[in-house]
Amino acid sequence: MSAEERAFQERIDRGEKIEPTDWMPEGYRKTLIRQIGQHAHSEIVGQLPEGNWITRAPTLERKAILLAKVQDEAGHGLYLYCAAETLGVSRDELIELLHAGKMKYSSIFNYPTLTWADIGAVGWLVDGAAIMNQVPLQRTSFGPYSRAMIRICKEESFHQRQGYDIMMKMAGGNEAQRRMAQDALDRFWYPSLMMFGPSDKESVHSAQSMVWKIKINTNDELRQKFVDQTVPQAQYLGLTVPDEHLTWNEEKGGYDFSEPDWSEFFEVLKGNGPCNRERMAARVKAWEDGAWVRDALMAHADKHEAARTAAE
Amino acid sequence: MSAEERAFQERIDRGEKIEPTDWMPEGYRKTLIRQIGQHAHSEIVGQLPEGNWITRAPTLERKAILLAKVQDEAGHGLYLYCAAETLGVSRDELIELLHAGKMKYSSIFNYPTLTWADIGAVGWLVDGAAIMNQVPLQRTSFGPYSRAMIRICKEESFHQRQGYDIMMKMAGGNEAQRRMAQDALDRFWYPSLMMFGPSDKESVHSAQSMVWKIKINTNDELRQKFVDQTVPQAQYLGLTVPDEHLTWNEEKGGYDFSEPDWSEFFEVLKGNGPCNRERMAARVKAWEDGAWVRDALMAHADKHEAARTAAE
Amino acid sequence: MTDTGDNIANDIFFDWLLRRGDTALVLGHRVSEWCGHSPVLEEDIALANIALDLIGQARLWLSLAGEVEGKGRGENELAYLRDAWDFRNLLLAEQPNGDFGQTMMRQFLIDAYQAQLLKALAKSADERVAEIAVKAGKEVDYHLDRSADLVIRLGDGTAESRQRMQMAVEILWPYSGEMFIGDAVDQAAAAAKVAPSPEDLRPDWVSTVDAVFTAATLSKPETDFAHTGGLTGRHSEHLGHILADMQFLQRAYPGATW
Amino acid sequence: MTDTGDNIANDIFFDWLLRRGDTALVLGHRVSEWCGHSPVLEEDIALANIALDLIGQARLWLSLAGEVEGKGRGENELAYLRDAWDFRNLLLAEQPNGDFGQTMMRQFLIDAYQAQLLKALAKSADERVAEIAVKAGKEVDYHLDRSADLVIRLGDGTAESRQRMQMAVEILWPYSGEMFIGDAVDQAAAAAKVAPSPEDLRPDWVSTVDAVFTAATLSKPETDFAHTGGLTGRHSEHLGHILADMQFLQRAYPGATW
């Protein structure tokens, strides 16, 4: 480790924030760009499964709440792209990488939203899992990322409550609604557990991230915490978690639960999720269809700038 | 009149059919191309307002009937383009003229189909008016046109009965259905009357067409006949024809009725009907989106032909 | 400021309120179709925000409409359980999104009208109307700033963008006249001092449009031909498809609580 | 030939019949969306005809399903009053039309399967099934001739058309595997000699596809990854939108006679 690297690590160990203009190791920068970019992409792609129900929301109030949520998500995307930009990569570059399949977004958004209860489940489980990941990241070592996380977490917990509220109404509703609620839990349970990633016991990569405080907890710790938080919520709803091995383990003070089917996880990662192709196609189409708009805004700004300069 | 022209007219007067290879005056050919082409275009554009309800037909039987009808209409378009082609103009040329706004289609298809009852009204009134126009044209002087009309009329009268059957169900249905039926009649009555065109008392053009037996009856005669046939049908349905001046005229043995608002007719003709732009946009889009298909079919045929020739 | 109950018949007032509520609802629906599909992230945010404001306005107008009707129908019964012919929105609001330019042009033409209307309604003799108008007016003023700005920037952008924006004008212009053609309902609302006459809103709207089009290097069509019917329930073919989607859950699961 | 009532449980047989009926219904719906919009008039006619046949087949299967279920539901109750999760169609059938090439590729992949299936079903131990299969089989053989021919002509057409058809293969191939993956319902139907095992249909299907792809100069994807779920009610996001449109009138006017 060089002297620079040692000094950098000591700052992190002391709990100091690293700011964009500070020196940082190339690996730190690259890892952060990948992580923040992927998170930003997830916010953007995550608009699509929820957008699928905006036009069909069952009441005007629910429609308004969902619109506000999707708006927040786009806003989160914006904060995160800005945080990534401080590391020297532009939003457009990140988007091009996404569209070229060279960057990922959270696999959960490759699952479809099939009933209104799925909108509840996405808020309750998906945002719930996201928060579990994000809360510790408020303490991450990179300043802009940490500050973005603080803003995002505040809104996400609001979204999670709204999702749970939908589930309450559905689970306490008529027979079809209860069936929708259970079906949504059945479909989203394991994909939500997968959101924390495979067990990272053996990952050197993860270890380095933890030393850098880009990652704060292990995937398994967070998954356990999520299960422990979520199971009582499901019980309160009168819904059954689709895991016959789920049992309370008094000794560890948490639930024992089944691993998700990791082969499914890797299939989805490879592009074989139910909606991978469509999600990416929708984003690429939006980007390509919008090229003339971006070009026009740029051209207008240039003209305006030229006119202003000429006038001076 | 030249000798040729005189001989031509005498053949028509004797009730002989003119065939494509026979000599004919240029005006006869041009008028026929315009009339047959316009009729063909109407069949094609006419698929759109009905297609609007195929995906929403209220029962599977109704959906099947409507599909069969729209299929028939495309078939009518095909017969008619073929009849026009015998006059030396290709289908593609006619379609290009339509898309360039240089040929018309029946203005009635610029009105929207807003409820399921409109599908009934289109069959009952629009096909009814069309048949009124077409039945005499079975005796038109141009052979291919006459033969196309014979096939078409058989199917159209079937469509009209199906339309009336929908109206019967609607008029005899619940309150909302009765309201839909009346609303459909209210909206389609005058546009149907307009389908016969303005009074042709003063049109020299029409007079020549009648001498040539391209046109058999005057617009006013046909309109009167349509009203006399349709009013009792409306009464049987328990619906009110939206014309407070409608009265039985014992003397002429027909109804007196209000003229449609001809300024509306000319507005629609000018392009200001409720759906003109959309109908044409839909057809142009279909044509442009389909260019690669037509090119490919042509290219395949050429390759195939080349291979066949080489093998010989 | 008094209640207007004595000055305008309830059924007419109801109809007038539906025109406000349905226009906001249907336009909000159209705008919301963009979620996740816009040309640039800032627009995803802005469009979701506009849709949200419009749905909020629809809720206020429809709730008041239900109150005035007095048959126990609330915002959701009105939004979800009427078929197309009972909707009273402007035809312009239900026109398809088209490309982003058409969406912005539609928004601008309506915003410029709504801004005028709401300013006048803020002085309505009916306090409930005035109250909604004040709240909605602030939102719409902001929408208008944005949509006018975008129309200018896209009109005076590239050759392609100008051509697209001019096309948007040609397509949408014939639907703008409906905003200013009053009928008996409007006359009754004007007589009761609930609302201005639609005709009176036109001059200021024209000034706004002229100024923005000039800055945008766009030409206004010669024709003043106007499609009408939306405000009295004769819609385009689009509305039925919008409602099939919008109303599915309420129709398929009647009486459920969501 | 005997009634199969004793050999297969009604609820399982019902489910099996829904798979047939819903696939025909949903595919017919998709094809019918082309009406008036196809690349060439002959295709408008052909597509309307295919849709008509498919709706006809759906009616036969769903009527029989309703009969087997024995709860008084007929073809219309089943088509119009079930939500997406109770539909049992192949995912392939509900995929969007895309361009004309994708529509033809979807049609070909399903036709080639249905032709095999219906040939086998013509020998079903259940006479009612056999009767429907004979009628539908004739129609589908004709559809297959057409769709295979078009796939060949468009594949071996221009550079653009080949590229589009290859793209259609890439998009749709992952939805084809579902046709040949049997489950308990299929096993029960096979055990009762009502139907063949889906797996047994694959070899002939593969031969057909290989022959047509070769003539069309198209390559088959390496992967055998298969999306599944349609046959058990886990659909794509598309089906809900299809049904919102399809079912609107029956949902909005419950109990009406049409």
Image (cartoon, coloured by chain):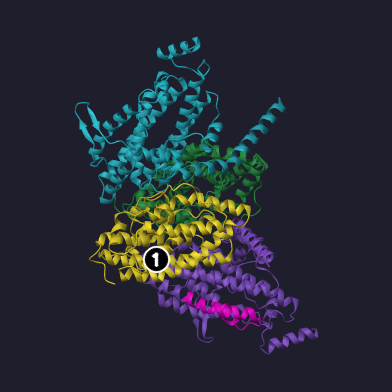
Chain colours: A purple, B cyan, C yellow, D green
The outermost residue toward the right is: A2
Task: Let me know if residue A156 is in the magenta part.
Answer: yes
Residue A237 left/right relative to A261? left
A219 above or below B276?
below
Circle 1: element type: helix
Reading the image, the residue beneath label 1 is: C118
Q: Which chain is disc 1 placed on?
A: C
Task: Let me know if residue B253 is in the magenta part.
Answer: no
Image quarter hosting the C terminus of chain A: bottom right
Residue at the image point whose x is 42% and y is 77% from the top: A235
What is the magenta range?
A131-160
C85 above or below A312?
above
Residue C9 left/right relative to C254? left
- What amino acid is found at the position of numbered circle 1 in the picture? Leu
Image quarter hosting the N terminus of chain A: bottom right
Image location of residue C141, percent across then percent down = 46, 67
The residue carrying pointer 1 sits among few (fewer than 14), some (14 to 19) or many (20 or more) residues within 10 Å by Cα, namely many
The outermost residue toward the bottom is: A14
C1 above or below D103?
below
Task: Identify the main secondary structure in magenta.
Answer: helix
Q: Is residue A181 visible?
A: no
Between A76 and D240, the residue placed more toward the observer is A76
Image location of residue B296, percent across then percent down = 63, 38
Image location of residue C67, percent across then percent down = 28, 67
Q: Is residue C184 visible?
A: yes
Between D100 and D215, the residue placed more toward the observer is D100
Between A259 and C228, the residue placed more toward the observer is C228
The outermost residue toward the left is: B250
Residue at the image point whose x is 28% and y is 45% from the top: B182
Q: How many marks?
A: 1
